[in-house]
């Protein structure tokens, strides 16, 4: 009885340890590492080689966003007649004394607001200027309101400062805190990891990707290196270092390569220049060496990366959970089941991308509607064609990521089971392993155990049988001991007769 007890204790320890093993066998983890480690080292080498050396060259143009900006506040707001301050407001409706109703005429009684604004930062702090607000203006001012003003040094003194925006620090910070609180409240530690990954993503974008492009590096290469770094850090930080995350990383990497190839093909074929508005025109004027079409392709890659992570992680997790629910399922069944989940995911994600891009371009679409231009003309104009190419190329990559990631995950978990790294039916740690619940139980030769049929034998292989054994964890369940037979008591392995 002592031997039996000692053996049972050893087996119980082994089972607990096996349940905590990584989900992939050593061989599979070696194969995955052989692919991902060189890729991660290449990304690190790219970061070092392309890291910008300093501030990008170039002088301020004094146009648009390239103007010097300072803080200011509204000190006084008063109503004045628009005509008294030189603001010409056109009167609406037919003239009172007759005449041509279409001829523009000033409204002598129109009332405007005159805001006195004081500069609060920079070398001209304390200087004041006035801003006239027309009756139909969309922006209004309140006393004490903080503003952002632009400075034009070459303009006349009274026109050097002008309001360009309002200060939104407090509401934006409050919204960010609400977002962070919601993520942590629901996600807990995983939510904290997601916020840390978000901070790293912004840091790579601001400290590496944007300065490196301005420094003259190829935008596509910069986007591939920076996006890959974001992908690896975000995935492993949020989901841990395991085979499931590695499968998602491989699926994301493969899909990114596909998006890059398709984007390069169709951007070149469609003759898209990437220079379609005032902002891109200003960049091209200030930095003529930047490849604007390459910048467009870089935007496609980075824009698709976040949704790709979501899709690949979801599919890899679905395969792992399906395997846990049915450990005996072959890889084809796992793949088919996970693909049913993936098809639902594809439908929702593609629709999300299309609506997101349509929402961003909504003012432009309104202008085309007002101009009464045909759908074909609108869709093939360069500005809209850029968004269509961006949406469709990204969507193709997302669609492709589902079968790629699902197939890879199904193969990994199936090969894992063949190598005996994961659980087998009934919860043991390998073929033929069984464990009776409670202390003082075990498997193997010794008093009170058995493997063959007989009184109290299990219904299938791998179960504990014989007197004192009542709960196997193999593919068959042991029968309960009949009344009158001896029963093993936990702890000291003693027997008693009923």
Image (cartoon, rainbow, N blue to C red):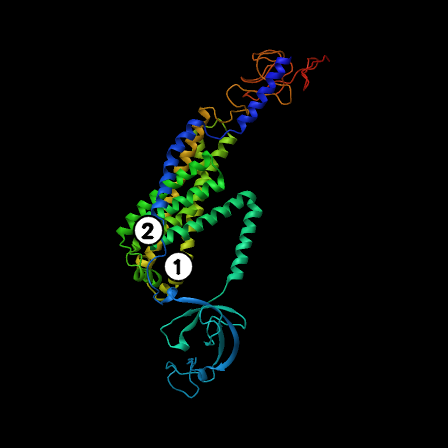
Q: Residue furthest right?
A: 498
Position of residue 452 measured from the top left corner of the image (x, y, whole percent): 56, 12
Position of residue 49 measured from the top left corner of the image (x, y, whole percent): 34, 46
Q: Secondary structure at mark 2?
A: helix
Residue drawn at the location 55% of the way across and 43% of the way down:
189
Position of residue 27 measured from the top left corner of the image (x, y, whole percent): 42, 27
Q: Residue furthest bottom?
A: 97
For marks 2 and 1, give the CA distance: 23 Å
Q: Is residue 479 above or below residue 63?
A: above
Q: Is residue 18 visible?
A: yes
Query: Which residue is disc 1 drawn over?
Result: 361
Q: Earlier in the sequence, mark 2 or mark 1?
A: 2
Query: Label 2 crowding class (10 Å Cα cut-off): few <14, some 14-19, many 20+?
Result: many
In depth, the one of 285 and 477 nearer the eye is 285
Q: Is residue 428 left or right of residue 89?
A: right
Q: Is residue 161 above or below residue 292?
A: below
Position of residue 473 measured from the top left corner of the image (x, y, whole percent): 57, 22
Q: Is residue 332 visible?
A: no
Of tags 2 and 1, the one toward the viewer is 2
In depth, the one of 274 and 262 nearer the eye is 274
Q: Secondary structure at mark 1?
A: loop
Q: Is residue 194 above or below residue 158?
A: above
Q: Is residue 453 left or right of residue 50?
A: right
In depth, the one of 47 and 278 nearer the eye is 47
Q: Which mark identifies residue 1?
A: none
Q: Is residue 54 left or right of residue 197?
A: left
Query: Label 1 crowding class (10 Å Cα cut-off): few <14, some 14-19, many 20+?
Result: some
Quarter placement of the N terminus = top right
Quarter placement of the C terminus = top right
Query: Which residue is disc 2 drawn over?
Result: 219
Residue drawn at the location 35% of the way across and 52% of the way down:
53
């Amino acid at each position: 009885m002592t031997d039996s007890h000692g053996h049972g204790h050893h087996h119980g320890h082994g089972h607990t340890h096996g349940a905590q093993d990584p989900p992939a066998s050593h061989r599979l983890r070696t194969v995955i590492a052989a692919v991902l480690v060189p890729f991660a080292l290449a990304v690190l080498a790219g970061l070092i080689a392309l890291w910008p050396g300093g501030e990008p060259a170039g002088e301020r143009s004094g146009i648009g966003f390239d103007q010097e900006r300072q803080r200011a506040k509204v000190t006084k707001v008063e109503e004045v007649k628009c005509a008294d301050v030189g603001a010409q407001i056109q009167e609406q409706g037919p003239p009172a004394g007759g005449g041509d109703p279409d001829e523009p005429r000033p409204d002598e009684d129109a009332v405007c607001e005159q805001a006195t604004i004081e500069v609060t930062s920079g070398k001209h702090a304390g200087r004041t200027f006035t801003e006239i607000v027309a009756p139909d203006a969309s922006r209004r001012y309140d006393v004490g309101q903080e503003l952002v003003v632009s400075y034009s040094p070459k303009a006349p003194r009274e026109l050097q400062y002008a309001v360009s925006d309002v200060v939104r620090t407090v509401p934006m910070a409050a919204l960010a805190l609400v977002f962070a609180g919601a993520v942590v409240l629901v996600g807990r530690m995983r939510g904290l990891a997601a916020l840390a990954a978000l901070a790293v993503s912004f840091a790579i974008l601001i400290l590496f990707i944007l300065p490196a492009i301005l420094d003259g590096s190829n935008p596509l290469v910069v986007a591939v290196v920076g996006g890959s770094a974001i992908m690896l850090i975000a995935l492993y930080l949020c989901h841990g270092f395991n085979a499931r995350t590695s499968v998602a990383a491989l699926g994301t990497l493969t899909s990114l390569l596909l998006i890059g190839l398709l984007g390069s093909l169709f951007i070149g074929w469609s003759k898209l220049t990437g220079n379609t508005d005032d902002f891109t025109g200003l960049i091209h004027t200030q930095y003529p060496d930047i490849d604007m079409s390459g910048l467009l392709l870089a935007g496609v890659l980075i824009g698709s990366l976040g949704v790709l992570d979501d899709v690949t992680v979801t599919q890899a997790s679905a395969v792992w959970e399906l395997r846990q629910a049915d450990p005996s399922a072959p890889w084809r069944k796992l793949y088919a089941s996970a693909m049913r989940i993936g098809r639902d995911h594809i439908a929702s994600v593609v629709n999300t991308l299309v609506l997101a891009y349509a929402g961003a371009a909504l003012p432009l679409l309104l202008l085309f509607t007002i101009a009464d231009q045909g759908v074909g003309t609108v869709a093939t104009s360069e500005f809209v064609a850029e968004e269509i190419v961006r949406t469709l190329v990204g969507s193709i990559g997302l669609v492709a990521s589902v079968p790629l990631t699902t197939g890879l995950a199904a193969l990994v978990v199936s090969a894992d089971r063949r190598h005996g790294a994961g659980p087998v039916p009934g919860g043991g740690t390998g073929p033929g392993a069984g464990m009776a619940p409670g202390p003082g139980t075990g498997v193997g030769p010794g008093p009170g155990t058995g493997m063959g049929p007989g009184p109290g034998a299990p219904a299938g292989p791998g179960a504990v049988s014989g007197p004192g054994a009542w709960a196997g964890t193999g593919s068959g369940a042991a029968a309960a001991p009949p009344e009158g037979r001896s029963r093993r008591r936990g702890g000291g392995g003693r027997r008693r007769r009923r």
